[in-house]
Amino acid sequence: MSGASANLRGGWALVKATWASWMEHRGFFYLVAFSWMIPLLIYMFIWSTAAGEGTVGGLTRGDLASYYVVLILVNQLTFSTNNWTVGDAIRYGRFNFLLLRPLSPVYDALASEVAVKVVFMTFALPLAAILALLLRARFDLSLANSLAFLPALLLAWALRWLWGYWLALLSFWATRADALLSLQESLIFLLAGQVAPVVLLPGPMQAAATILPFRYMVSFPVEILTGQLSSSDLGIGFALQVGWLFVALALFVVLWRAGLRRYSAVGG
Amino acid sequence: MSEPHIVVRDLSKTYRVPEREAGLLASLRGLFQRSYRDVEAVRGVTFDVAPGEMVGFIGPNGAGKTTTLKMLSGLLYPTAGEACVLGFSPWERRPDYLRQISMVMGNKSQMLWDIPPLDTFRVLGEIYHVPSAQAQRTVDELVALLEMEDLLTKPVRNLSLGERMKCELVAGLLHRPQVLFLDEPTLGLDVSMQGRLRRFLAEYNRQRDVTVILTSHYMADVVALCPRVILIHHGQLLYDGELQGLAQRLAPFKLIRVALRRPEWDPEGLPPGVDIVESENGRVTLRVGRAQAPALTAHLLNTLPVADLAVEDPPIEAVIDQVYQEGVS
């Protein structure tokens, strides 16, 4: 990444231009964003029906509605569309242009990350607000939980992005590394509170969800905001989230360096 | 004389490429045992390029031209040898180096697809830390030279290939690079657009004194722009010198064109070793060894009713075609 990484001015200009270029396709992205919501809405209705007038795993209908509404937003805020295009950039030579500039290619990825989030939120925020009203979501926000939510959300985004990025970097060696990204998404679906809130998962799955990184990419901040976690859960959760982030970062750095060496050995 | 901008010594690049036969069985075999083949793309190439010089880099497909340019622009590590451009080792890709060079590729685009070119230019200006007044001035200048005012506000995806190529040039020149690598900049363009780009490049080189290496399969590009050519074939440097000298060195024959006052003449009267390339209605073209040309000219003038006679080097395309197909004798 060398000295090229310190080019903040160029990086910010790239964010703005990428945003403008993504806004050109907002109709497409709104449809994508909507399609991501559908499975979550389905599971929300299933669990709400299961809860009926009572509770399921201690969660009422109102709790489940607020959980899934926040989950919809967090899922969109943490999903990295950029990781799906890294492989193509490497295969089709667009990566050459990124390397020719006095700016680390990581900025290009960060630019689309920031840009796409803004585009998605122009759609997802109003829709989530409408859903929350319609479904009578019950928000019981404490100041402590709200304050803990923000760093957890930021860390969740960083973890999900970097984890996907190191998988995508395998494209330097294998032609279709994006199959691994699909696997990551499936595991997120199962273990990161989408098919069911983690508290409702059966024992072994709940244990796996607690230890593996996927929960910390999506549902952990949601559980914090909706008050599902005790303070000891919170501490352990943050420790694991930060720990996995370091693992992802280390893998990313190692693969990035080795990948660039290989790229400049065999060409694009 | 000033120091050369580009110094290349014994530069080599060998790729190791996976190899497998076509078909399902072979692809299954490839899962367990991969076989590789070494491809020597560039073999011991040595040359210098002086500041402000425009050099044509020619050779058939797969000769190693693009690989060499990629090494010089820092995209590839060489297997052996050295290169020094503007005092930098290109493959270290130091920001100070990247800010002074540019590579424009005719078959790839660095424009942001969905927004107008002006936006890409702004981003590049920021990435290269060009002060905005200077960036504006450079864009205005280039836009005027390329006659492309009306393209600036259309999304790039709506531009034609030629229009896009103009944008690529502005994008590549915005930071006023001192060294410019042009890889097939006229690829796929129509004749008049090619001509306009050539005039632009010649004018730009004259004004700014940039050092240019140009690869092209259109000899007209090279003839129009590059007093010096480097011919590379099978990764090896075959010729480095004036374009004129290339024909003399590589084509050991001359063409003699004769117009006769009467259409009928007797080919039997020609001395041995002379080929008739064309003979129609008293217009005859003969091919003869360089050394023989003066004697044959005298012979023709003495024996035939010559109305007009011209001795020429063969067209550069024909020479190049001969080298590409047969190598150098």
Image (cartoon, helix red, strand yellow):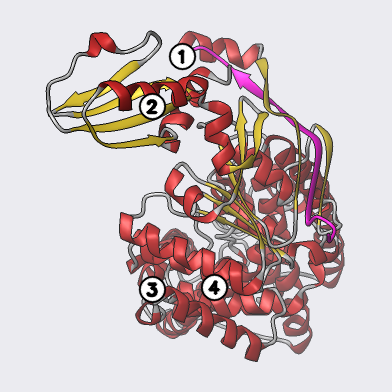
Marks 1 and 3 on same chain? yes
What label does residue B316 carry, if any?
A: none
Magenta-highlighted stretch: main secondary structure? strand
Instruction: Using the image, name the chain to which the residue with label 2 belongs.
Output: B
Q: Residues within 10 Å of mark 1 (few under 14, many from 20)?
A: few
Marks 3 and 4 on same chain? no
Marks 4 and 1 on same chain? no
How far from the left and from the top, in percent, is residue A76?
A: 55, 68
Judging depth in this view, the residue of B198 and A109 nearest the camera is B198
Mark 4–mark 2 distance (CA, rounded to whole Å) = 68 Å
Mark 3–mark 2 distance (CA, rounded to whole Å) = 60 Å
Q: Which residue is mark 1?
A: B22
Disc 3, SS? loop
Mark 4–mark 1 distance (CA, rounded to whole Å) = 41 Å
Mark 3–mark 4 distance (CA, rounded to whole Å) = 13 Å
Q: Magenta includes B307?
A: no
Give the residues in magenta: B1-22
Q: Give the residue drawn at x 54%, y 13%.
A: B28
Mark 3 or mark 2: which is in front? 2
How far from the left and from the top, in percent, is residue A17?
A: 55, 77
Mark 1–mark 2 distance (CA, rounded to whole Å) = 57 Å
Question: Label 3 is placed on what type of residue?
Answer: Pro
Disc 2, SS? helix
What label does residue B297 carry, if any?
A: 2
Instruction: Using the image, name the chain to which the residue with label 4 belongs.
Output: A
Q: Earlier in the sequence, mark 3 or mark 2?
A: 3
Q: Give the residue drawn at x 73%, y 48%.
A: B72
How far from the left and from the top, in percent, is residue B279?
A: 20, 24
Mark 3 or mark 4: which is in front? 3
Q: Which residue is mark 4?
A: A18
Marks 1 and 3 in Cβ contact (< 8 Å): no
